Image (spheres, rainbow, N blue to C red):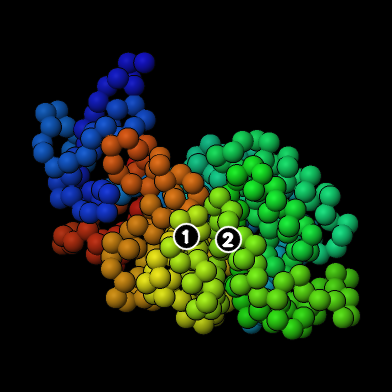
Amino acid sequence: MSANQSVSRTFRARWVWASGRWLRDGRVTVQGAWIADVGTAPVTGEIDLGDQVVLPGLVNAHTHLEFSALREPLPHAGSFASWIRHVVQWRRTRSDADIEAAIAQGAAESAQGGVTTLGEIATRTADLPKEPRIVSFREALGLGHEALDPQLQLARRHLEQGAELFGLSPHAPYSISRDLFCGVIELARQTHCPVAMHLAETREELELLANGTGPLVDLFTEWGLWSAGQSPAFRSPAEVLWFLRELPRLLVVHGNYLTHDEIDMLACRTNVSVVYCPRTHRYFGHEPYPLREMLSRGVRVAFGTDSRASNPDLDLMSEVRLAHALHPGVAPAVWMEMATRCGAEALGWGEHTGTIAPGKLAEFSSCGMPEGVSNPEEVVLGSTARVTSWKP
């Protein structure tokens, strides 16, 4: 053990969010990269951080960092299909070097905003920054049979990089063939890797699944990806969830239009999480998010920023604060847990991070208490105080 690893240091802050409760004048003892102790008793030689609110490192469970160079969201003109058109057009203008630079830029922005772990949807092979920790889900998509073997080969190569930080993402039920979807899911079962899938995101998605019509079908027909009389690969999000239900770890991304029965399918499943992206939800003008129903049924819900293609920035705490404003009556502790522990558990890192507790990694975020404010929940949820990463 190195000298640095053997030295214990204790930090005192005005408030510490530790294992689901607030500690006034909280103390956190750190030894090396790990938390050794948490409490309120004064410790000789402690380091006083002053009027700070200390939180676990924030967890952004869903991002697309390749869009991080965008200065403003891509237009949608009231149609998700229109936005998809802009996404594809934009992607065609970007080189691998552009994508790597954007990923680095987005990772740095995330870290500066207090995020220590994030879930990234990867569309190309790229070197990933070491901070924050990135769980990389390789995207698979393609409606034609010709996409099957190349996409599965890319998925296999992605998983060869390791188990803890790599997963798969069958993009969405409207953009993937049934054969490719089943191939990706079987690969995930064999390798025990996590899976993230966009599901029940828009009304246009639901129309394509139920009827084989709508703006997405029109777009795919224009692109030569959809033929007259073609049947959707799936008929509803419920059908997709039936295939996904037994995966080791599943992230349902968005879930804006999950029905009561579909929420029941997710309820109390420890292997399933839903990722709520409040500002992207607002950008597209979706119907009210069924958060209260999910929480009341025991569904684990985490936060995501989605990307700068539908969001002005990657500030996770802005997602939390908007959700707090949109869903009055949800206990403040729920927001704190959704932004930290729930995200860590969703990404498979709950044993190591997401809470401030002995035996966890010493990964923190913090913000200063504005003058005249004494309630830590008001600081975190009801103010504009900047939350940043903090390293002992």
Q: Nearer the viewer, residue 258 or 142?
A: 258
> Which image quarter holds the C terminus?
top left
Position in image of residue 386 (x %, y %): 35, 56
Residue type beneath disc 2: Arg
- Residue at the image point whose x is 60% and y is 66% from the top: 241
For residue 236, side relative to residue 23 (left or right): right
Q: Quick check: marks 1 and 2 in contact, CB under 8 Å? A: yes
Q: Which quadrant of the structure image shows residue 283?
A: bottom right
Mark 1 and mark 2 lie on one chain; the one further toward the N terminus is 2
Q: Secondary structure at mark 2?
A: loop
Image quarter (top left, top right, bottom left or bottom right) of the N terminus:
top left
**Which residue shows up at 81% across the image and 73% down it?**
220
The residue at 37%/40% (across/down) is: 363
Name the residue nearer the viewer: 262 or 279.
Answer: 262
Can residue 272 be seen here? The reply is yes
User: Residue under circle 1?
Assistant: 269
Residue at which label 2 appears: 245
Q: Residues within 10 Å of mark 1 (few under 14, many from 20)?
A: some
Judge from the rendering whether residue 196 lies leftward or rightward of residue 304; answer left or right.
Answer: right
In the rendered structure, which amino acid carries the disc numbered 1?
Arg
Who is closer to the viewer here, 333 or 348? 348
Q: Residue 171 appears at what percent x and percent y?
A: 68, 60
**264 versus 112 height, above or below:** below
Disc 1 element? loop
Q: CA distance from mark 1 to mark 2?
A: 9 Å
Residue 328 image point, x, y percent: 32, 77
Numbered-mark total: 2
Residue 69, placed above or below residue 353: below
Indicate the position of residue 263 as horizontal and vertical percent values: 50, 72
Q: Which residue occupies 32% across, 16% down?
A: 3
- Above/below status of 388 relative to 294: above
Q: Is residue 183 left or right of residue 130?
A: right
